[in-house]
Image: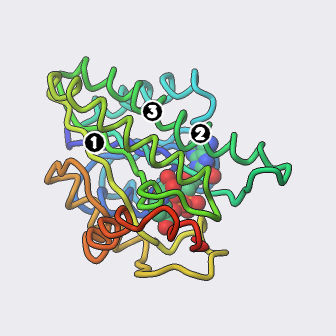
Amino acid sequence: MPDSVLITGASSGIGRALAIEFSRRGYALGLCARRLELLENLQHELSRNHAVEIAELDVSQYDAVKEVLFKLAEKLGGAKIIIANAGVGERSLPGEGTFYLDRRVIEINLLGAMATIDAGAEILKKQGGGQIVGISSVAGFRGLSNVPAYSASKSALSTYMEGIRHHLTQHKIAVTVINPGFIDTAINTNRKFRPFLISAEKCARLTADMIEKKVLSSTVPLWPWALVSGAMKFIPERLWCRFKT
Ligand SMILES: NC(=O)c1ccc[n+]([C@@H]2O[C@H](COP(=O)([O-])OP(=O)(O)OC[C@H]3O[C@@H](n4cnc5c(N)ncnc54)[C@H](OP(=O)(O)O)[C@@H]3O)[C@@H](O)[C@H]2O)c1
C-alpha cells in the first residue's frame, strides 16, 4: 500500500496542484472540496498512477468533516499526511455591511481548518503517527488593511498549530505550518499588487519538499518571504497603518 495524503480544498489552486505533485511522488490521494465535478475530473486525470478517492465536503459543515475524512482514510487503508488547505479570501471592511463575509472567512479558514486538524489528529493517533499540515499565509504575519479578517484567520490558524505541536508530537504526529506568499490562483486574481508571485505548480513542488522534510514552519517560497516577513514584523504600528495592503 503506498503512502497516502488527504487534502481539503483540492478542487483548484494550491490544493489541486498539491494533489498532482503528491501523485507524481507516488502517494495515494484522498481529495475533498465542494465542487465534486472538478474533483471527478482530477480523479480521472490521476487515477492511472495511484488510488485517488474523492468526496464532496464543505469544511464549514463541521460534523461532516470527521465523517468524510474517516471514510477517505478507510478507503485508502490509512493516511500518512493530512493537509488542511481549504480556504477563501474575501475583501471586507468594518461598518460596510459585510460582516457576513468576515464570518464566512473565519468559519472556513479557521474553524474549518481546526475541524480538519481535529479529525485528522484522531485518524493519525489511531494509526500511531503521521503528519498534519496547515496552509496558513504570510498574510497572518501582520494585519492586512484590505483583508483584515483573512489576516486574522491565518494568524489564528498558525498560532493554533504552534499550540498543538507539543501534544501531537507525543503521539508521533508532526505538525507543519506552510505560509505561502502570493501564488497565482483564483483567490487573488483581483489583486493588483502580487509581489514575488509564483505559480501554483511551483508552490506545490516547494511545499511537498517541505512537508516530506517535516519542517515545522516555512514561507513558500522560502526567499525572499522569510526575509520580508521577518522585516514586516519590525515595521512600527504607526507606519504600518499607512500602507494599503
Ligand atoms: N493563492 C495565494 O496567494 C495564497 C497565499 C497564501 C495562502 N493561501 C491559502 O491557500 C489555500 C488554497 O487557496 P488557493 O490559493 O489555492 O485558492 P483557490 O484556488 O480559490 O482554492 C481554494 C480551495 O478551497 C476550497 N474551499 C473553499 N471553501 C471551502 C469550503 N467551505 N469547504 C471545502 N473546501 C473549500 C475550494 O474548493 P470548492 O470551492 O470546490 O469547495 C478550492 O479547492 C487557502 O487556504 C488560501 O488561504 C493562498
Which residue is found at the position 62% from the left and 34% from the top? Answer: 60
Left or right position of 91 against 220: right
Left or right position of 137 against 174: right
Residue that carries the numbered disc 2 in the rendered image: 56
As shown in the figure, which amino acid type bears the numbered disc 1? Ser
* Mark found first going from the N terminus, 2 or 3: 2
Residue 183, position in %: x, y? 46, 71
Between 32 and 165, the one lying in front of the other is 165
As shown in the figure, which amino acid type bears the numbered disc 3? Thr
Between circles 2 and 3, the one closer to the viewer is 3
Mark number, residue 181 = none
Specify the quadrant that holds the C terminus: bottom right
Task: Tell me the distance, in whole angstroms, between the alpha carbons under discs 1 and 3.
Answer: 16 Å
Residue that carries the numbered disc 3 in the rendered image: 116
Task: Tell me the distance, in whole angstroms, between the alpha carbons under discs 2 and 1.
Answer: 18 Å
Q: How is the image coloured?
A: rainbow
Q: Whereabouts is ligand 1, in terms of quadrant?
A: bottom right
Which residue is found at the position 67% from the left and 75% from the top? Answer: 190
Between 168 and 195, the one lying in front of the other is 195
Left or right position of 129 against 67: left
Which residue is found at the position 51% from the left and 43% from the top? Answer: 32
Q: Secondary structure at mark 1?
A: strand
